Image (spheres, rainbow, N blue to C red):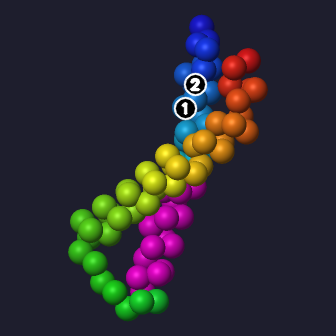
Amino acid sequence: MTTEAGARWKQWLVSWLVVWPLSVSMPWALAALLELADLQLPGWLFKMLVAGLISFNMVYWLMPQSSRLMARWMVR
């Protein structure tokens, strides 16, 4: 039932554990920064920036680290 990379539910769980805090904190942090800079963006642009920042952090920083950290557990 497991693949070489691990069970799919384990991959899902690790991804969710990384996405959830980002999707909660990133909009709040970006809104606070924009407020400090006294900038107002249209809603669609704000959402696009949040999605881009979350994706960037996931792909280049958090998923590689979390995959290495959880590698032994994922292949059990």
Amino acid type, mark 2: Trp
Q: Position of residue 12 (x, y in %)?
A: 54, 32
Crowd rating for badge 1 (residues with CA inside 10 Å; few <14, some 14–19, many 20+): few
User: Which part of the image, by quadrant, shows the N terminus?
Assistant: top right
Q: Position of residue 34 (x, y in %)?
A: 41, 82
Does residue 4 show up magenta in the picture? no
Q: What's the mark number on residue 9? A: 2
The CA distance from mark 1 to mark 2 is 5 Å
- Which residue is located at x 58 percent, y 51 percent? 61
Find residue 21 and report its image quarter.
Answer: bottom right
Crowd rating for badge 2 (residues with CA inside 10 Å; few <14, some 14–19, many 20+): few
Q: Nearer the viewer, residue 64 or 28?
A: 64
Does residue 32 show up magenta in the picture? yes
Q: Nearer the viewer, residue 1 or 62?
A: 62
Amino acid type, mark 1: Trp
Q: Secondary structure at mark 2?
A: helix
User: Which part of the image, by quadrant, shows the C terminus?
Assistant: top right
| Residue 20 can be seen in this image | no
Q: What's the mark number on residue 12? A: 1
| Residue 65 can be seen in this image | yes
Residue most toward the front?
60
**Residues in magenta?**
21-35
- Which residue is located at x 70 percent, y 30 percent? 71
3 left or right of 53 in image? right
40 left or right of 17 in image? left
- Which residue is located at x 69 percent, y 20 percent? 75
